[in-house]
Image: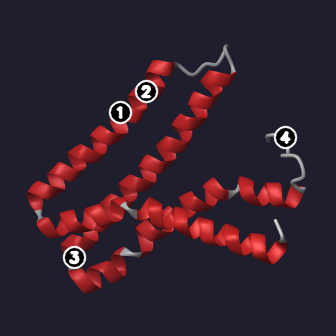
Amino acid sequence: MEPAAPGLEPRAESFYAGALRRIVRTLLALAVLFPIPVGWRYGLATAVGYFLGAALSWLNFKSLVRGVGGLMDRIVDAHSRERSGVIVLSFLLRYVLVGVVGYGIFEGSSEAFRGFLFGLGMPVAAILGEAGYEAYAALRYGY
């Protein structure tokens, strides 16, 4: 655990330290729960596309968190085990994976592609939800 910021009480530090965990859980919940109403409203192909996009964005976000952590270790610790080439390659491979899956879905079904694009936007929804939750906590508990 990192040292506390000056003037930040331990409860607040613990709360803010859990932000990434809450974002990842929210992404997973959105990937699992939203295909039901999306499928009911727009059809099965759109729901499957949405699920694939949301699942891929969840994997992408988790990979991004790991990559940034590895990059931080590499910058801070000169004797880090993280290799900079591997870190950069993993960043690039995430986008290649999104492109390949997106192209395959685009070629298969326009409805599924629409859902896929919607699913790829779910990290934005999860981060906005976290921002709202943190604003609520700041107002409610004075963090």
Q: Residue 3 carries which label?
A: 4
Which sits earlier in the primary sequence, circle 3 or circle 1? 3
Residue closest to the far bottom:
41
Residue at 16% across / 50% down in the picture?
103
Badge 2: how crowded within 10 Å, few (<14), some, or many (20+)?
Answer: few
Question: Image quadrant of residue 69?
Answer: top right
Residue in the foreground of this view, choosing between 124 and 97: 124
Q: Which numbered disc flags the more N-terminal residue, 2 or 3?
A: 3
Q: Quadrant of the C terminus?
A: bottom right
Query: Which numbered disc, 1 or 4, marks the residue that appears first in the sequence?
Result: 4
Q: Residues within 10 Å of mark 4 (few under 14, many from 20)?
A: few
- Dot 4 falls on a residue whose secondary structure is loop
Type of residue at label 1? Answer: Leu
Q: Pick whichever, 55 or 102, lies toward us.
A: 102
Closer to the eye: label 3 or 1: 1
Nearer the observer, 39 or 11: 11
Give how far apart the Cα atoms at labels 2 and 3 are: 37 Å
**Tag 3 secondary structure:** helix
Q: Which residue is drawn at 86% across and 61% down?
A: 11
Label 1: how many Cα within 10 Å (few below 14, some 14–19, many 20+): few
Q: Name the residue under label 1.
A: 92
Rounded to the nearest whole Å, what is the CA distance between mark 2 and mark 1? 6 Å
Q: Do the residues labelled 2 and 1 touch (CB within 8 Å)?
A: yes
Q: Do the residues labelled 4 and 3 touch (CB within 8 Å)?
A: no
Q: Which residue is identified by label 3? A: 44
Is the Cβ of the residue at disc 2 closer than 8 Å to that at disc 3?
Answer: no
Q: Horizontal placement of 86 versus 42: left or right?
A: right
Residue type indicated by callout 4: Pro
Secondary element under disc 2, as helix, strand or loop, is helix
